[in-house]
Image (cartoon, grey):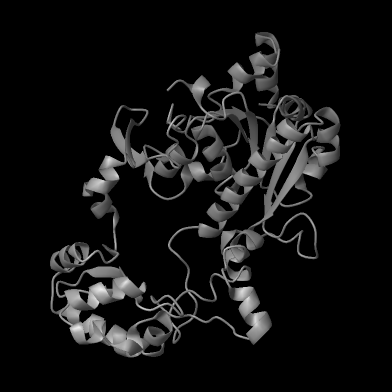
Amino acid sequence: MSAAQKPLAGVKVVELGTLIAGPFCTRIMAEFGAEVIKVESPDGGDPLRQWRKLYEGTSLWWYVQARNKKSVTANLKHPDGLAFVRKLIAEADILVENFRPGVLDKLGLSWESLKADNPGLVMVRLSGFGQTGPYKDQPGFGAVGESMGGLRYITGFADRPPVRTGISIGDSIAALWGAIGALMALRHKEVNGGAGQVVDVALYEAVFAMMESLVPEFDVFGFVRERTGNIMPGITPSNTHTTRDGKHVTIGANGDAIFKRFMRAIGREDLANDPGLADNAGRDARRDEVYALIDEWCTQHDEADVLTLLAQAEVPSSRVYAAVDMFSDPQFLARQMLESAKLPDGKAFRMPGIIPKLSETPGSTEWIGPALGAHTEEVLSALGYSPTVIAEMRAAGAI
């Protein structure tokens, strides 16, 4: 599919963001056809370029996070660099930024001034605590949002301190809300003839929005949801168990009919027909008994046998996948979730496939994360800057 046929073709996005939340938000847009112009500092650019595992001096994460984006450099503290960015934003449909509130205002890029230049602008603002409130000026990374939003408190085991997930999930959740908000704001403009607007996403609120029944349960019953390890609180059985060969298998047999099939598959017809276990409330009341028998059964069988038997019984289950499992899994391969690409030196590598999968206008990778400033001259030229002026700006440190 050509870029012109993608669903966001013709949408121009400017990214003033670093690391995870802002860049992940725009990555989604770039994968589906938006022209995303990432503005970076000439002094090293986005720190993500140097995060985690580096290949030939550049982060492998960067190549994924910045795919399909154009990189331009601009010194926002230089008047010519700032003027360049203002001109760029004046022609954009969407601006995504994840600075601490107040930073852009000090640079002369306040919402009021940008809106005056571009009344139809949609400005996505991702920050730790949002653009208002007593905490708005405090720095807040994803870890803080996960803690304040309630996720960390319920993650882990009851007899140990809270733990984190192994990824920056708070940033990524906020990025998704940002992308959703931006597209809703664009829809409003297109259908209702509305003007541009601010999409204000706070990391802690993005996480808080995912916390299921936490609020009404506390408000009505005074119930505080606590850490429960690998089980699904109040829903039984749903847990991770260890097999005879030391592997870990997740089994979700919490549907009434599924539980009966599960018990019959493991030779426990008596429990399949036990009226006390016929519904979730009964099973959850006997949670310890149910999990103990599943644990015991799993320790008597290897992972492959457990998964085969449960698949035959149509009981939802899965090994707990590491990367090595994903690379050889037929479902991952059939759904093209491991895309092949090439690094700048020609070395082949694989990166995650693109979701969601649209039947008629799917996203695709056009290029991997670019070198710092790779598109600066192209973008400046499109804005009407002459080669002479571009050279002068470069010499002056504006770009």
* Rendered residue at 76%/64% (across/down): 135
Residue drawn at 59 percent across, 75 percent down: 214
Foreground of the two, 278 or 199:
278
x, y percent for residue 64: 44, 39
**Which quadrant holds residue 260?**
bottom left
- In the picture, measured across the screen, residue 158 lies left or right of residue 189, that is left
Q: Quadrant of residue 228?
A: bottom left
Question: Residue 20 placed where, x, y %?
Answer: 55, 49
Say if residue 253 shows up in the picture: no
Q: Quadrant of residue 386?
A: top right
- 5 relative to 120, above or below: above
Q: Position of residue 158 (x, y in %)?
A: 45, 85
Quarter holding the N terminus is top left
Left or right placement of residue 345 versus residue 31 in this view: left
Q: Is residue 175 left or right of residue 273?
A: right
Is residue 210 in view? yes
| Relative to 36, residue 328 above or below | below
| The one of 60 and 217 positioned closer to us in this rendering | 217
Q: Position of residue 31 (x, y in %)?
A: 49, 34
Whether 337 is drawn above or below 153: the answer is: above
Q: Nearer the viewer, residue 246 or 290?
A: 290
What residue is rendered at 55% in x and 80% in y? 225
Task: Please name the residue shown 15% across and 80% down the image.
Answer: 267
